[in-house]
């Protein structure tokens, strides 16, 4: 039997229904006994739940809720706060509020925040707060809010979903890194080398911002006047192009689930590498396994470039693509974070890159040893890259982004850069 839609009196509680039934019965008995005073009592008793229902319905519609999330953009594992601002009273009775918290946004996801408000001033309203500590990157939505209004006598209870949500952008965790592999990027960590070779007729003098300890005789006064800040000359060095950081996001190339998956490790390592290189002044381009790069992450340096890359990585989802490489995959130096791959797939990747590169190859089998889908062995893949003169290090589930980066540095140094 199908259950019909909630009727007019669905908001009346069991107590209110009993009172309504008692009032109607009293009226009937009073009519039979011809007792006018008893009729008045019965009418009052029967009308009380109906008046409470009307009052509760008006209160439910009159109250407005505004939500604010501070901050709305934050790294994994850091604290955020949600403020709920209630206005529009007065509140007659009480109101219970239950906010909707997204999965992986902290302990509140299993036990949604609940509040009970007994008094609401029409002039000042009331503000409620609760903390959030997201445990997984992503684009989350906080809300909607469910309100449940009850009259003072407990005769009625009406529920309402207050539409409206606020976004919460949770960025991947960034691990501080040190150093760069030899021959990667622009030497002293400034884009001056690449900039000095753009176009014809430009000066070959390489400059960067003045740093504490630089000799004043190296100040380049013409650039200082142009940039309105002290700029110093760099020693002449070979020019190298921008750095391409390649992230393998193929679902078939990763193992594990949730925050403990190899894909999340790859995202965290990629975020750490990009931020590290950008802070050193290197122009960085983020590229995916199919050769595409997200809008807004063109080769550039500075805080805005790092923020753009982190925003893209926060919203990243696995790809259904099975192959690696694409037309004109990378320009300049290449630094790849790769999941499981066959040697033939890596040959296609090497062919789409202009020269040798650096790679962190994940041994994804260590993230989920009990999986029924076997991952390709990591040794043949590493050998295929080394034959192409790539500097390769292998990282397992017991590694960290910092350790994987240090291993890559040592591998490049042993190979002679």
Image: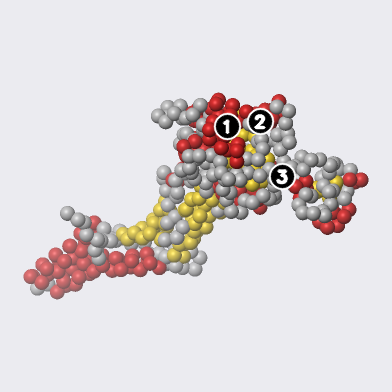
Assess whether mark 1 and mark 3 are in contact (beta carbons under 8 angstroms): no
Q: Is residue 342 above or below residue 211?
A: above
What separation in Å lies between label 3 and label 2 (alpha carbons)? 19 Å
- Front position in the image: 262 or 87: 262
Residue for point 60% across, 33% down: 360
Residue at image mark 1: 361
Q: Secondary structure at mark 3?
A: loop
What separation in Å lies between label 2 and label 1 (alpha carbons)? 15 Å
Q: Residue furthest left?
A: 32
Sequence-earlier tag: 2 or 1: 1
**Local crowd size for mark 1, using a 10 Å CA cut-off: few (<14), some (14–19), many (≥20):** many
Residue for point 42% across, 56% down: 144
Q: Where does the image place residue 342, in percent across and percent down from the top left?
A: 51, 31
Q: Using the image, tell me which numbered label, if any, was put on residue 241.
A: 3
- Front position in the image: 378 or 84: 378
Q: Left or right of 123: which side holds 29?
A: left
**Local crowd size for mark 3, using a 10 Å CA cut-off: few (<14), some (14–19), many (≥20):** many
Q: Using the image, tell me which numbered label, if any, was put on residue 389.
A: 2
């Amino acid at each position: 039997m199908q259950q019909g839609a909630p009727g007019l009196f669905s908001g009346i509680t069991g107590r209110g229904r009993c009172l309504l039934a008692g009032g109607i019965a009293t009226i009937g008995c009073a009519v039979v006994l011809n007792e006018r005073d008893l009729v008045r009592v019965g009418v009052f008793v029967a009308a009380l739940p109906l008046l409470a229902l009307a009052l509760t319905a008006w209160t439910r519609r009159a109250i407005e809720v505004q939500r604010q999330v501070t901050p709305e953009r934050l790294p994994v594992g850091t604290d955020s706060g949600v403020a709920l601002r209630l206005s529009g009273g007065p509140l007659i009775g009480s109101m219970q509020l239950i906010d909707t918290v997204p999965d992986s946004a902290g302990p509140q996801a299993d036990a949604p925040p609940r509040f009970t408000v007994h008094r609401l001033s029409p002039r000042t309203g009331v503000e409620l707060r609760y903390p959030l500590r997201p445990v997984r990157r992503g684009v989350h939505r906080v809300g909607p809010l469910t309100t449940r209004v009850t009259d003072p006598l407990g005769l009625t209870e009406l529920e309402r979903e207050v539409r409206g949500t606020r976004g919460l952008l949770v960025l991947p965790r960034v691990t501080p890194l040190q150093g760069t592999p030899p021959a990667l990027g622009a030497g002293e960590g400034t884009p001056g080398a690449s900039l000095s070779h753009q176009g014809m007729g430009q000066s070959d003098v390489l400059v960067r911002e003045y740093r504490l300890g630089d000799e004043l005789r190296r100040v380049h006064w013409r650039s200082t006047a142009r940039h309105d800040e002290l700029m110093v000359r760099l020693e002449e060095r070979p020019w190298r192009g921008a750095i391409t950081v390649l992230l393998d996001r193929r679902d078939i190339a990763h193992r594990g689930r949730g925050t403990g998956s190899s894909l999340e490790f790859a995202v965290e390592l990629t975020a750490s590498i990009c931020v590290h290189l950008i802070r050193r002044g290197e122009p960085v381009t983020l590229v995916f396994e199919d050769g595409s790069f997200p809008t807004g992450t063109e080769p550039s340096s500075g805080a805005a470039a790092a923020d753009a890359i982190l925003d893209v990585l926060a919203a990243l989802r696995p790809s259904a693509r099975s192959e690696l490489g694409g037309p004109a995959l990378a320009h300049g130096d290449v630094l790849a974070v790769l999941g499981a791959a066959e040697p033939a797939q890596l040959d296609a990747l090497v062919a789409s890159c202009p020269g040798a590169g650096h790679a962190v190859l994940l041994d994804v089998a260590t993230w989920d040893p009990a999986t029924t889908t076997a991952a390709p062995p990591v040794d043949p893949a590493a050998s295929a890259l080394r034959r192409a003169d790539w500097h390769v290090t292998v990282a397992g589930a017991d590694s960290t982004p910092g350790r994987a980066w240090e291993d890559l540095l040592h591998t490049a140094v042993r190979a002679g850069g």
